[in-house]
Image: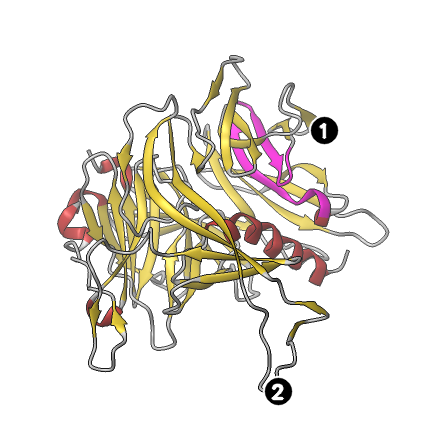
Amino acid sequence: MNDLEDKLSRVLSGAAHLVPQAPAELAATVKARHRRRRARTTALCAAAAVVLLAGGTGAVVSTLGSSAESHPAVSATGEAKPPADKIPPPVEKVWPQAVRKIPAKLPDGRAYYPQLLLDDHTLLVMTGASDGKRQFLWRYDLDTGRPRQVAEIPPTKGSAIVAEGVAAGGGNIVWWASYKDAGSPRVARIWTVPATGGQPRPVTDVPLGNVMKQGHIDGLTVTGSDVVFAYEKGGVYRVPLSGGSPQPVKGAERHHILQWPWVGVHHGKAIFRELLNVETGERRDAAVKADEEVRCGVDRCAGVAVRYKTVKVERPRDRSGKEIRCGTRRCPDTMRTQTVLRRFVRDRDGSQERKLPNSFQPGDDAAFERFFKVTLSGPGTQIVLTLYDADTGRSADLGIRPDAKGTMVTPDSGLDRLMTYQIKNEMYVLDLAAIK
């Protein structure tokens, strides 16, 4: 496999999780960074529906169920204009205890990429991640604004993938990178270094084989004296931090890591519906109805209830009446419509269901299983990204807006406490654990 295939496999793997849940307002979603802590660059459009063609059947995702409940205003030209949403106060006003604003560059002028919080006031960041220069890990003191170098990341070999999946635990930091020596199969090499600093040391080489089929590795986690990880297509493994060969985790041969020790499988439109605690053997199955599409965490599930309908459509024709073909095949004569009936978050057992905002779209994990990124329509139909707290019902404006080209960088959240994003020359650091 060459570098192009290597990079392509990563893009396709990430896109596979995004396509079914893409909001109607978003024409395309592209990963902008290849770190565990990533930002997403999103291209925006004003389309009212997304049309997908697959085989001989089309699919239309209706936005009727997702739009505001009030009737849209009508302009002088007769075109309907959606009403502007009420925009909540800025995040630093709603949750001041959780927000830090720091310079977006280190004192020496280098750009950095936040990875995770080592403690309440120490942010682990990476430099040199996207400019082809030497890569370093740094401890950034949020109280003093002073960075301290942890280690230089060894360069990759024969690969377009740099350090990925940064994680920490037990006083150690780990990451992985793809390597390809001439005449040898491609591997994902896991590295470790003390969180206080030192010389990086390789832990193990994980065979990648056909990454287009099996994927790279994901869910890298430090647990006690071991490192655990999963293949992107499923299968959980464990290896000692001291080194050795990865060994499969019993009972998790097809699973993905949600939040260690909880692992699960991806069943169609019910992601992590079934969970297994590989340390205790406990199982948790979520209550999901036939018309629901959900993504579950350890304790809660969030998703939508949908209604599908197949309708007949006329095949397109040109001015002469000749049928227009869709590529090399005839255009479909049926179209599948999807209407969102409700949006919700609830406990895994089906209890404590709460309504989520109309513009909520399932996709990323809900940070702390309670915080959801929600897009609103501001004055002039400008897209406004907000953060919604399902526990309290409060919302905050993250301050992120599209640029002149209609794109904006949005934070990519996981299940942990950290959310970061850059606005102009400032880096916003949100510690969601500080929100009570």
Residue 245 badge: 1
- Which element carries disc 2, helix, strand or loop? loop
Quadrant in the picture for the N terminus:
bottom right
Marks 1 and 2, the one that precedes in the sequence:
1
Between 322 and 35, the residue placed more toward the observer is 322
Q: Position of residue 263 (x, y in %)?
A: 53, 27
In the image, residue 222 sits, relative to residue 281, either above or below, namely below
Question: Which of the image's four quarters has the C terminus?
Answer: top left
Q: Is residue 224 magenta?
A: yes
Q: Determine which quarter of the picture holds residue 346.
A: top left
Q: Amino acid at mark 2?
A: Ser
- Which residue is depicted at the point 83% across and 54% down? 182
Foreground of the two, 229 or 88: 88
Q: Is residue 35 visible?
A: no
| In the image: residue 150, left or right of residue 382 | right
Residue indicated by mark 2: 320
Residue 347 x, y percent position in the rendering: 34, 26
Amino acid type of the residue that numbered disc 1 sits on in the rendered structure: Ser
Q: Position of residue 345 (x, y in %)?
A: 33, 35
Q: Quadrant of the rendered structure where residue 401 is?
A: bottom left
Which corner quadrant of the image does residue 398 belong to? bottom left
Q: Which mark is residue 411?
A: none
In the rendered view, does 32 fall on the left or right side of 204? Answer: left
Task: Give, as a single range, the part of the protein colored magenta.
Answer: 213-234
Q: Which residue occupies the extreme right position in the image?
A: 183
